[in-house]
């Protein structure tokens, strides 16, 4: 930790607080450091560390960065995170500075995250290489967050945390001096802990290379491309990247098998379902609802996005009608009127329907009934399709039942729209992967 | 409470549980009821109640409803909630039954909520006339939820509750036998507790009348019109209403001064800001961000929706540059780089800018800094513009600071998109009210 500090609020203190409880050794590096910080004695320079260093975290201002990277190279450090701004995002001089450190790093084989990033977090490994407070609360899980902006990376990670969803990693790329989307996507595609990769993209100089990497990924990738309106100036001032042509990116992503979503929430939601549930084989969704109104919202939302609600098989309809004679609406959506003890059997019947590739369920929570956790536990794996719920209720009554349902691997969304939008992204994944035809569309010369 | 029951899980029990702690008297009515329920002794019929009855809650099946409404009329009951389904949503016979009860109710001047609704809640008055569990946790506040579907009404109410936002009322209209959107909107427009009215609309036979009522409302009204795709069959099976022509509704709402939103979340968010903050005079938004990435998302989202980010006044730019020399991006958005102690002063400078009609702020929570609550307390009222925040962070570190900020009347959103979308709806309100020109557009003969 280069630039470690004992002054609370300073990046060198906050980052030290986040990283000090990592299982391996952590060395606070500061030539003017005296004594220790978080129980670790200061060393004067990276050269003074008495063992091989895997990772250097640089909490030093931009002008000092080149010499520290040089030191990292000489000490055979594997990688370095550069938190400081003042590089490619800050005009010509900054751009030169960034080229200089990239050259040094490349010579010595040092992988650089940043500059101008708030870092990365691997919750499952206890690595909190970020200076943001609270990152140690992000739970481990299956989605890798890869954001061009460190701020967005953290925003996504904390949203996930609030909604009890785990991440395999959170990475803020920043200016991408020598590690870009490609290297990170390839890494997480090979990572056994990662079941989905979600991208926040402002813009990149080599869109073709990004798209080809996404196409080659066996792990599903979802993208949120920001910059549909003209925010070019502001974006360039940010991570030194132009936002580029939004329509071209969107078309390119689709062509290379990457669904494009419309918000941070939809990005997280799609990633969460893809990481915890089987992927759908097609774009046909079965809807089961215990309350018609939210069911209509879901059906409307799915249809607007071009996702189909297929007719259910005769066998399914018979099963549903046996369970619920005189049911309110025994088609697709299946509207059970109110929840009842057999609600889980209805969900199961629809999930087993051959016409259906994915299932979304809406059920207001009723304390006396709870959720049909037993009936749907293992259902998604059994039928090889995603099965998701949306619900609402008083938190004090709902929380335990929801934890059980989520514990059985069923994502539970807070609004009907978010459940629908997540399945739209997954249906689109089935669609764009089936029709992906990488060709000279984007960035071709 | 007609049809009150001692059997847990039955509507007549759940509704009784929700209503029994109301400040006034509650009489459980059931000819076969013995003893008492929730401490109240059963009476055999409404006629046996020994004082004037303001409201009857009918937890009885459809075939019994006509005779109970007759009884209500004879006992001069003011209004009745009919929870049962099996009326206009259930085919010709049901439609006749509904006409019959409407006729009886009209004769005797009984206002009917429903049939086919889960009821209503007035948190501030302690009235929980719903059979859904947990409605007593909905906090009192300034937004009136008026939903065509009882399920959506509850979904909205519980979403609001989870996000610590109060409601002046939650009403599920159901089949609207003799109380429709018009009566309820007029009521809440006159209600001193209500600062905004949010509508969930599937469809209505007399769109013109609904639009004219909205136009006449001095309280801002926002609408979520469901049924953009073809979900007509399912919707008709629901509240007996056709979803109608979506484009006509949307155009109609705009023309009559009602912004149309795209989701339950945006509906709640718009209503919450309108109920707690001054309305904007125009469509110019100032953006202040402590992290560029989420700021770009907000700017992009606003611009896509046609909301403008005006150039700030010279005076504002000078103030901002005085506070933060060498600031990352001292235009609109103002990007402060990271939060710092003067962050609140920057927000204040932008809010005071004459070119700006509304302010949205993004700030990842940092434990050492908290939020600039002191600087923004009372700011919205002072400048006569809405001022909203979006943030993210670890709940354990964030919750207290957020509660303080919200306590100062500042809405705090969970994602950058939701803050932006709320202000889009408010900017649209300024725009459509300024340009409202009610005319023979919808439902004209």
Image: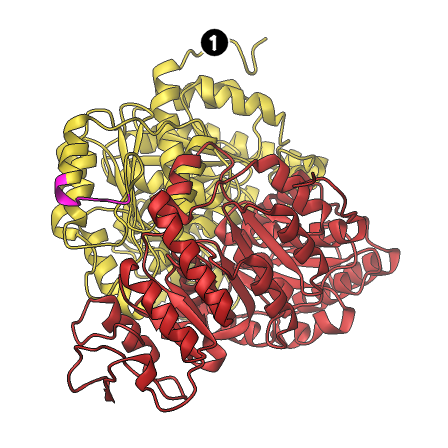
Chain colours: A red, B yellow
Chain under numbered label 1: B
Q: Residue furthest right?
A: A314
Residue at 25% across, 47% down: B336
Q: Is residue B429 above or below residue B140?
A: above
Residue A267 drawn at (x, y percent): 54, 54
Q: Is residue A16 above or below residue B25?
A: below
State the image quarter where residue B18 is shown.
Answer: bottom left
* Quarter of the picture holding the C terminus of chain A: top right
Q: Residues within 10 Å of mark 1 (few under 14, many from 20)?
A: few
Q: Residue furthest bottom?
A: A50
Instruction: Report if residue A257 lies within the magenta region.
Output: no
Q: Main secondary structure of the magenta part?
A: loop
Residue A205 drawn at (x, y percent): 55, 45
Residue at 23% across, 77% down: A30
Residue at 21% across, 35% down: B350
Identify the secondary structure beneath mark 1. loop
Question: For this rendering, which residue is in front, A372 or B176?
Answer: A372
* Quarter of the picture holding the N terminus of chain A: bottom left
Residue B178 drawn at (x, y percent): 49, 31
Residue A292 visible from this viewpoint: no
Q: Which residues are magenta?
A: B322-328
Question: For this rendering, which residue is in front, B347 or B278?
Answer: B347
Residue at 43% across, 81% down: A126
Residue B57 visible from this viewpoint: yes
């Amino acid at each position: 930790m280069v630039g470690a500090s004992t002054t609370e609020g300073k990046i060198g203190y906050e980052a030290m607080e986040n990283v000090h409880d990592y299982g391996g050794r952590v060395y606070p590096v500061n030539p003017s450091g005296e004594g220790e910080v978080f129980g670790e004695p200061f060393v004067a320079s990276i050269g003074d560390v008495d063992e091989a260093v895997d990772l250097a975290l640089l909490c030093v201002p931009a002008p000092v960065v080149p010499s520290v990277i040089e030191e990292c190279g000489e000490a055979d450090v594997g990688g370095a995170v550069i938190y400081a701004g003042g590089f490619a995002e800050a005009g010509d001089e900054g751009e030169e500075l960034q080229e200089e450190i990239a050259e040094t790093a490349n010579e010595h084989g040092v992988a650089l995250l940043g500059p101008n990033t708030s870092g990365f977090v691997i919750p499952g490994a206890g690595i909190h290489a970020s200076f943001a407070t609270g990152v140690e609360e992000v739970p481990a899980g299956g989605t890798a967050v890869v954001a061009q902006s460190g701020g967005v990376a953290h925003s996504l990670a904390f949203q996930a945390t609030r909604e009890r969803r785990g991440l395999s990693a959170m990475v803020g790329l920043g200016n991408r001096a020598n590690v870009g989307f490609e290297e990170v996507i390839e890494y997480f595609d090979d990572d056994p802990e990662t079941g989905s990769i979600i991208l926040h993209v402002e813009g990149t100089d080599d869109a073709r290379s990004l798209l080809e990497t996404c196409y080659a990924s066996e792990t599903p990738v979802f993208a949120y491309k920001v910059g549909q309106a003209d925010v070019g100036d502001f974006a360039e001032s940010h991570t030194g990247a132009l936002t580029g042509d939004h329509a071209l990116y969107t078309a390119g992503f689709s062509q290379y098998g990457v669904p494009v979503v419309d918000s941070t929430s939809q990005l997280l939601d799609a990633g969460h379902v893809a990481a915890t549930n089987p992927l759908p084989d097609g774009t046909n969704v079965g809807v089961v609802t215990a309350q018609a109104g939210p069911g209509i919202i879901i059906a409307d939302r799915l249809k607007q996005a071009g996702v189909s609600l297929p007719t259910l098989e005769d066998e399914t309809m018979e099963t549903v009608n046996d369970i619920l004679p005189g049911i309110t609406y025994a088609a697709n959506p299946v509207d059970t009127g109110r929840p009842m003890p057999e609600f889980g059997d209805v969900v199961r019947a629809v999930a087993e329907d051959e016409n259906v590739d994915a299932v979304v369920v809406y059920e207001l929570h009723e304390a006396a009934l709870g959720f049909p956790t037993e009936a749907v536990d293992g259902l998604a794996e059994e039928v090889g399709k995603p099965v998701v719920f949306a619900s609402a209720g008083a938190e004090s009554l709902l929380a335990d039942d929801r934890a059980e349902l989520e514990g059985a691997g069923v994502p539970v969304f807070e609004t009907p729209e978010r459940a629908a939008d997540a399945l739209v992204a997954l249906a689109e994944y089935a669609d764009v992967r089936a029709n992906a035809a990488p060709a000279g569309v984007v960035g071709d010369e």
